[in-house]
Image (cartoon, rainbow, N blue to C red):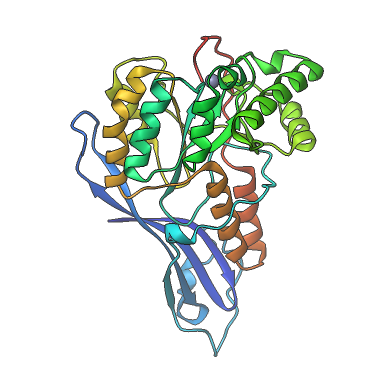
Amino acid sequence: MKLFIASLVFAASALHCMAQAITPLPDLTGDAPPFEAVATNIVVAVPAASISTNLLGIGGVVGPLPATTNAPQPVVSDVNLHEANLPKPTSSSRVCFSSCHVSGPYIALTFDDGPHPENTVRLLKMLKERGIKATFFCVGQRVADHPSVAKRIVEEGHEIGNHSWSHKVLSAMTDAAVARDLERTDEAIRKATGVSPKLMRPPYGAFTDRQRDWAHRKWGYSITLWDVDSQDWRNPVASYARSRILQGTGPGSIVLSHDIHKSTVDGMPKTLDALKAKGFKFVTVSQLLALEQEMLSKLPATPGAQSYADRATKGRPAKVSTKSTAQAR
Ligand SMILES: [Zn+2]
């Protein structure tokens, strides 16, 4: 087992160490290189009095530790949340993000460019059989063509997001044209499902910083990118996408696949089962955001905690692609 320290925060006369315990697992798929699985996330509070002065200066602990005579006893707590106790999603302050900071093995699977009358329906059945919730970034035109599939996505507990009307490069369009495109898509989703999307994913991830801020202010969208790209559009062999997903996914990951490709859906049972075997728990993107909010709210209000929250809010560097492949992303 390896222990990776995520953050060190000094507060209340103790050093709070947030870490991830990683347990190596053998390759479960037979076609992917060996990978590691997250066993758990832990928080340990170590009383200041018991910390060696050798620790001074590492990982954000700066300056001398104050002497204390009534330091609390060491506390070890598993901060994993049971699925039944997931926090309720609320509107997020995150403008744009590609992953979340969560204190548990939670991930969000996302499927783009549907709904597809056959492949999306097959995928929904696979997800239902495994009790997995996902997020579907739908193209407005396809929602209008297949409203019953869009309705089923929502009825079965998945989240639905706006992926533009016809998959154009929004960063090359005027604000007025983008507004018409997104509002038309929202309307089609509302008409088919009765819900208004809180999430928006620009095709190819192509949305300027200014557009991200503008869309967040105007419609409240959280612009949702990804940190794991299956590249299932690039290679129709299912094991290619599976290998990329299994190698790249970690706690808080947002995984990108496409439910319009038959090969993607064909390979999904094995991928889902392998992710489950690694201990991952599947939530929607809004649930992942809510888990992040909940974790951040539990951090002590110290300068160290502030910097951690700040990092989480900014997220990892957003990926922007200008690829013009019609069905990519
Ligand atoms: Zn797309």
Q: Residue at x 50, y 57 (%)?
A: 86
Q: Residue at x 64, y 14 (%)?
A: 169
Q: Residue at x 30, y 22 (%)?
A: 238
Q: Is residue 177 left or right of residue 5?
A: right
Residue 70 in view (yes/no): yes
Query: Percent from the top left, x then y, of residue 154?
Result: 53, 38
Q: Is residue 244 left or right of residue 218?
A: left
- The answer to whether residue 219 is above or below residue 11 is above
Name which quarter of the figure residue 222 lies in.
top right
Q: Quadrant of ligand 1?
A: top right
Residue 158 in view (yes/no): no
| Quarter of the rendering occupied by the N terminus | bottom left
- The answer to whether residue 37 is above or below residue 16 is above
| Image mark count | 0
Query: Percent from the top left, x then y, of residue 62?
Result: 60, 64
Given residues 287 and 63, the one toward you in this image is 287
- The answer to whether residue 148 is above or below residue 306 is above
Query: Percent from the top left, x then y, of residue 326?
Result: 52, 9
Query: Percent from the top left, x then y, of residue 92?
Result: 67, 47
Given residues 328 and 54, the one toward you in this image is 328
Name which quarter of the figure residue 299 lies in.
bottom right
Given residues 166 and 302, the one toward you in this image is 166
Given residues 60 and 31, the one toward you in this image is 31
